[in-house]
Image (cartoon, rainbow, N blue to C red):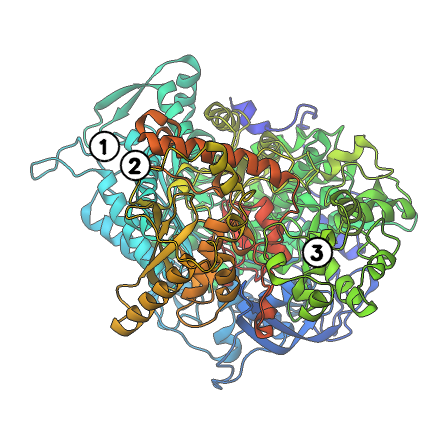
Amino acid sequence: MRAQNATAASTKGQARPATQSSSKAIKTKGTNGAAKKDQARTAPRASRGVSIARINTRAGVDPLENGAPGPNGGELVYERRASIITNPDGSIVFKMEGAEIPSGWSQLATDIVISKYFRKAGLHGDAKQGEKSVRQVVHRIAHTIRNAGEQFGNYFASKADADAFEGELSYLMVHQIGAFNSPVWFNCGLWAEYGITGSGGNWAWDMVDAKSSPAGSVMIETNNAYERPQCSACFIQAVDDDLMEIYELVKSEARLFKYGSGTGSNFSSIRGKQEKLSGGGTSSGLMSFLEVLDRAAGATKSGGTTRRAAKMVCLDMDHPEITDFINWKVREEKKALALIAAGFSSDFNGEAYHTVSGQNSNNSVRVTDEFMKAVLAGGKWQTIMRTTGEVCDTYDAKDLWKQVADAAWHCADPGVQYDSTINRWHTCPNSGKINASNPCSEYMFLDDTACNLASINLTKFLRESPDGVQSFDVDGFRHACRIFFIAQEILVDLSSYPTKDIAKNSHDYRPLGLGYANLGSMLMQMGVPYDSDEGRAIASALTSIMCGHAYKTSAEMAGSKGAFNGFAKNREPMLRVMNLHRDAAYQINRDKCPSALYRAACEDWDNAVTLGEQHGYRNAQSTVLAPTGTIGLLMDCDTTGVEPDFALVKYKKLAGGGYFKIVNQSVPAALKKLGYSAPEIQEIVAYVTGTNTLLAAPNVNRRSLKERGLTDADLTKAETAIPSVFELDQAFAAWVLGEETYQRLGVTKEQRSQRGFSILQHLGFSRAEIEEAQDTIIGRMTIEGAPYLKPSHYPVFDCANRCGKIGQRFLAPMSHVKMMAAVQPFLSGAISKTVNLPNEATVEEVAEIYEEGWRLGLKAVALYRDGCKASQPLSTSSKDKEKDEKKADEAKHNETVMTGLAPIPKTSAPQDATQLTLGLTPDYATSGSRPKGLRVRLPKKRVGFTQEARVGGHKIFLRTGQYEDGTLGEIFIDMHKEGAAFRSLMNCFAMSVSIGLQYGVPLQTYVDQFTFTRFEPQGIVEGHPYVKMATSIVDYLFRTLGVEYLGRYDLAHVKPESEEAIPHVGFLGGKEDRNSDSELPASLAYTKEAISRSATEAEALERNAEPPPARTEARRVEDAAHEHAAAASPLDAQLDAMMGDAPVCDVCGHITVRNGACYKCLNCGNSMGCS
């Protein structure tokens, strides 16, 4: 088992030599001789400090000045930019103009640094003065860290080395080569540079004490949060079997949640509910306390943000309450489903999920090798009393394992952490066991410790010679790792921490979390498939270089600063682990790895071990692979951590708002590396993203459109919109061409409000002609089938999701697991990554992934099956009309409450009901109206539904009454807390609409008239499965009626599954209720049969209809003032198709994407996790 864990991903390596030179520098591509000299240096003189080579900067030249030398012979050039972040409805979240930003930064990176990291006020005592330039932010951080290094002593060999360090760190940050975790950007330097003070309460190392006590063991409570800033994002806290200590954990967790950090704990020491108390009686058990902590986390969350607390709960498999813990979230999810079925909101922050417990943490079980062997052997597993050590219960190990897999299949929890593997690679076992991790599972170390993170952008080190030979700049990468690692080391003692114990342990053990981003993008640019032996070998080598060089640097610092305080106690096990890392480096598959990378990987570990034996290490841990959510976007990374890319086509944000689609920047580079010519690359890219012009397009082009009445001005508007749309019809929408053009073309409002209306079809183009033109103009969004591209090269471009409507390829779940296994042996910590599974994945597949993670030597695995949570705000199945739609979560079919279940006359033939539902005959079925001029009253007992929702926080009940044929005849509106006057007005409005409907006013007319009406209350809609935003109560009402009765899914923000498109007439049951006719009244069983048939026929018709526009493109409004919010961003539309399980961003409301174990927003850069 040890060999499996130690060598994870490789089979073809070489045996490590018995002795290795610790001073021989490898011959790889470098920048200059100074760099090579820096790499070769192995033993700095004691008490002198480390030397810093300048490989990117020159002495006397400020790397942050305009015109300073930049990468690849370029210069640093600043420009003035604005940052505008908007909600999906167009309202502004944040706006700032005139900021000074490097010209090479994207608009998204600009928005992140301005909105999140610029200090907005308080500079030099001026409440109105804030940071206006990236150079101010970078200087604030780099200069503060450099000064702290000099203040602490023995970090730099000389002032010149300190100058070089500050210059190199500034260069790496301003050119997006590396970045710290967000707390450093938020807090570091505010006091040192601007004199800004903050509240106290944290704990920090006493610098004064350090001068008289080398151990520096005294911790002091701070009274200024910015003098000793909190710079760590990841925390692990201990908890013991003591009532008061449990509630102390509540307090310390609350402090961390308050400032946006995450924490994890292992609760296995707390006695189970079966165990006795010292004062008599029986314990209430672990689960009761977990519920208290869960509620506390939820309360802290609601105290200032809608973002869930970042919290990890771990439990050992031998705990007496392990089965309750495994199934905790499954039970609570079932309760939530029942509440949702009863009409409560399915939103994660709605009443259903707020009522149940366990929703504010990630849960993980800790499994040992002994347990896994019992599973494989079909053996038994015993749980142990915490107080007496006696056996509590005996289980079949396979049954417990199946419970874990089944629970994860249902609700994504618990994840699995492999306890034996984790502690086998533990550098400080003599100081205690590793019991837990941070919420994202990349930081694993002793209890009551913290870790600050930083990441390096791998693609910045790809080089190409004049003759086209590609290489990786090993020396440049090593140098960046060295600079950031030294900076992180200095931050350990500059920082403050939420508790005294965390402050002391962080000082004594000094764990760091250096990592990287953009691996997936780099492999693609190299022309190497993510799922390949070569890709895994390259990833292994790069991770090995990063970790080995970090420990080499740590040993150098130990030579001048001394080893970390716990090293002497753990010298033997730490050196053992260092040799495990070195052994793994020699086991990298050298046949698949570039020779320079392989040699460097082995060399760095030889030097790290040799220097560690000589000086010890300054840091107990050095590397992790974090999700790099916000900071990855800050560095303009296409991919984060070890993730592959999620799509070949991206939407690039424009200054001032809006998007346009571009091919992933890695695609042309990969095609060039694979040997395709420039003209071939151009055609392949055009196949993917389209030509973005009407010129020379088949069927739909400038000539044919002019012949059908469009002017040059109209065509210019359409061509301007083409780069930002998914469907060709969207470029000719009313909000693009204008109302006058539509009137000139003879398009009535009634026509264009019909579901599936296509302006191009109205102009005489066939569906086939439009699709052919769309493929040329808009693109296929996939590279499959591209001209010239060899099928053997398809794997290079495989992404985490299927790309485009015709794309079939995507990376298999196990390919993610294998990549994790390739890099795990070269990390001190672990990997934050969620393995995404399709909805149709089985429980057995979940168990297989968890088992394979153990076999391959991973430290943790978390997974997510698409569609397993009822709180998903978006449909997650493919939008391709040609594919069979997958069934959505059961509760979504039961969001409406049936009232007045009346018998339906048996004289109505089934085919007539079907035709009515489909809108085939008679005419009024398509418009929702009755025959005009005659009032048709409803039957005394009628069918309808009740829909509960919240609009902008205001609860509203919409009740409907239907005719026997299913058309709408009346509505009731209840808002019980809005005051008598408002309530009476709404009642009168409902009566007016109801009478109009009964006199034959088409429902379509009401929908067209009242949607997009704007007044308070307005905002986010909770409780409706498809309508998620409303500009007013009236807008919500008629969006809902349009969706439910007219099939107006262009008014919905979430497109329903085809099956859900038809209102369900039935009770509030689960799957059995909908499928069992025998349990329904005869009249309802008949209705159910008719609706089932109509759903099938509707799906058949839908396949041949025009696909609806992006989610909110139905802005066919008469008020031009609302047109700025006419369509959903194409970015949201793209993510709707691929990331439907992701929540909306809690800052700007746009759709997020999965990022490790959490989520990130590609609109504003927010990270919904602890990274």
**Reading the chain from its start, which is encountered first: label 3 or label 2?**
2
Dot 2: within a 10 Å radius of its alpha carbon, few (fewer than 14), some, or many (20 or more) residues? many
Residue 147 in view (yes/no): no
Query: Which residue is pictured at 47% across the width and 30% down the height?
Result: 421
Q: Are marks 1 and 2 in contact (CB under 8 Å)?
A: yes
User: Which mark is on residue 386?
Assistant: 1
Mark 2 lies on residue: 268
* Residue with the most extreme left position: 280
Question: Who comes first in sequence, dot 1 or dot 2?
Answer: 2
Q: Which residue is mark 3?
A: 759
Tell us which disc is closer to us: 1 or 3: 3
SS class, disc 2: loop
Mark 1–mark 3 distance (CA, rounded to whole Å):
71 Å
* Whether residue 463 can be seen here: yes
Closest to the camera, between mark 3 and mark 2, is 3
Residue 1055 falls left or right of residue 945: right
User: Residue 412: x and y, percent?
Assistant: 44, 37
Choose between 380 and 847: the one closer to the eye: 847
